[in-house]
Image (cartoon, helix red, strand yellow):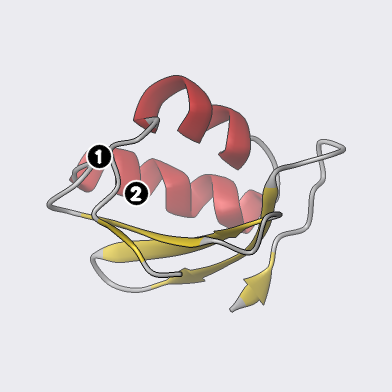
């Protein structure tokens, strides 16, 4: 997984992994969640990929727009 850069200051996101149709996100608690085109959907996943690469706004986007709508909890 790639370390999240935290350009906006403090973040709940630690690292991420981007695939063609998904993004995996590891939070500060160590838990890893899978978000994919099925849940929460293509539009949200593509936005999350952009925010992850930018290093800013990913945690806020998840808490405001995605919430508990993940595909799978991996850990």
Mark 1 Cα shell of 10 Å, populated few (<14), some (14-19), many (≥20): few
Q: Mark 2 points at which residue?
A: 46
- At x 43%, y 65%, the residue is 24
**Is 19 placed left or right of 5 in the picture?**
left
- At x 48%, y 34%, the residue is 62
Q: Mark 1 points at which residue?
A: 43
Q: Where is residue 61 in the image (x, y as percent from the top left)?
A: 51, 30
Query: How many numbered dots are placed on residues in this image?
Result: 2
Q: Is mark 2 on a helix, strand or loop?
A: helix
Mark 2 Cα shell of 10 Å, populated few (<14), some (14-19), many (≥20): some
The answer to whether residue 66 is above or below residue 25 is: above
Instruction: Please identify the quadrant where the N terminus is shown.
Output: bottom right
**Is 3 placed left or right of 65 in the picture?**
right
Toward the top, the furthest residue is 64
Q: What element carries label 1?
A: helix
Task: Kindly check if marks 1 and 2 are in contact, taking CB atoms under 8 A apart as contact.
Answer: yes
**Is 74 placed left or right of 3 in the picture?**
left
Q: Position of residue 43 (x, y in %)?
A: 25, 39
Toward the right, the furthest residue is 9
Distance between the alpha carbons at the discs numbered 1 and 2: 5 Å
- At x 19%, y 43%, the residue is 41
Q: Position of residue 74 (x, y in %)?
A: 38, 69
The answer to whether residue 61 is above or below residue 45 is: above
To which quarter of the image does residue 31 belong? Answer: bottom right
- Tell which of 72 and 8 is nearer to you: 72
């Amino acid at each position: 997984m790639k370390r999240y850069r935290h350009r906006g200051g403090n973040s709940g996101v630690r690292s991420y992994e981007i695939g063609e149709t998904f993004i995996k996100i590891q939070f500060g608690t160590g838990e890893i969640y899978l978000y994919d085109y099925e849940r929460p959907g293509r539009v949200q996943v593509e936005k999350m990929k952009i925010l992850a690469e930018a290093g800013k706004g990913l945690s806020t986007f998840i808490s405001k727009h995605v919430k508990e709508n993940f595909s799978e909890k991996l850990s």
